[in-house]
Amino acid sequence: MHIYKSWFWPGLITVALLTVLTGWFLTDPIDQQLTEAANAALEPANSWASAEIDGRDLTLKGVAPSEEALAAALKIAADTRGVRAVDDQTTLLPLADPFSFAITKSDDGILLSGNVPYGDSRARILAAAENAMPGIEILDEMAVARGAPQGFFDLVGFALRQAAQLTNGEVEISGETYNISGTAANSADYDALGAALRMPIPGNGKAGEIKLAVPVNTSGG
């Protein structure tokens, strides 16, 4: 019996230590594999989201562009094979109500401010602004938000084209309401601005406050 005790307890301790160490060394590779699998499943449709896994428990982080996108990402996370539970630590983009956008034109250039949808919206609007008013300095103060109305980009494109015909002024979109004020570059532009506003405004736009002036030193027209 004495000999049995002499090797039994040290052996049991050794086995226990090896079990703990084996679990320790195997946990990180397994977590890493699950993390990579979850993130691969999220790409590219849900690139805003990132997954981290610890002990088969997944933590989802990121700023979701919409409630639908958040629900889709949570489902992907929960359906990832090997994941035991999902901890949702995501947030939603702020909701802008009304969703507003403004173009302010002055001698210093143009200022783009207000709200833009998630994704490539900012790049699209900046490219459209450069195309409508080439060579003019553009200051970007746009903020990403939810709540853009249908036809938003069509309405913004129309606003940029009209802003190009002003020497100074502001074009504002608030929801679907279209407001414009400022001084036209010349009589021809003044007439063109007024004619465009008498037609249906793109993007389901509805005319709001219209205050246009023509330069007093303009000749002809």
Image (cartoon, rainbow, N blue to C red):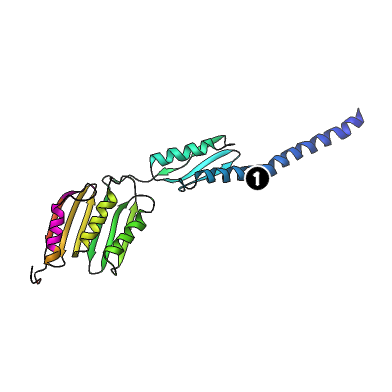
Which residue lies at the image location 48% right of the left edge and 36% below the top edge?
75
Q: In this view, does 209 lie to the left or right of 104?
A: left
Q: Give the range drawn in magenta.
A: 190-207
Q: Position of residue 221 (x, y in %)?
A: 8, 67
Q: In this view, does 194 lie to the left or right of 149?
A: left
**Circle 1 residue:** 29
Q: What residue type is labelled 1?
A: Pro
Tag 1, which secondary structure?
Answer: helix
Which residue lies at the image location 39% right of the left edge and 51% below the top edge?
119
Residue 169 is inside the magenta segment: no
Q: Where is residue 148 in the image (x, y as percent from the top left)?
A: 30, 46
Q: In this view, does 54 lie to the left or right of 137?
A: right
Q: Position of residue 128 (x, y in %)?
A: 30, 60
Q: Is residue 122 left or right of residue 200?
A: right
- Taking the view exactly as shown, the residue that stands out farthest to the top is 1
Residue 192 is inside the magenta segment: yes
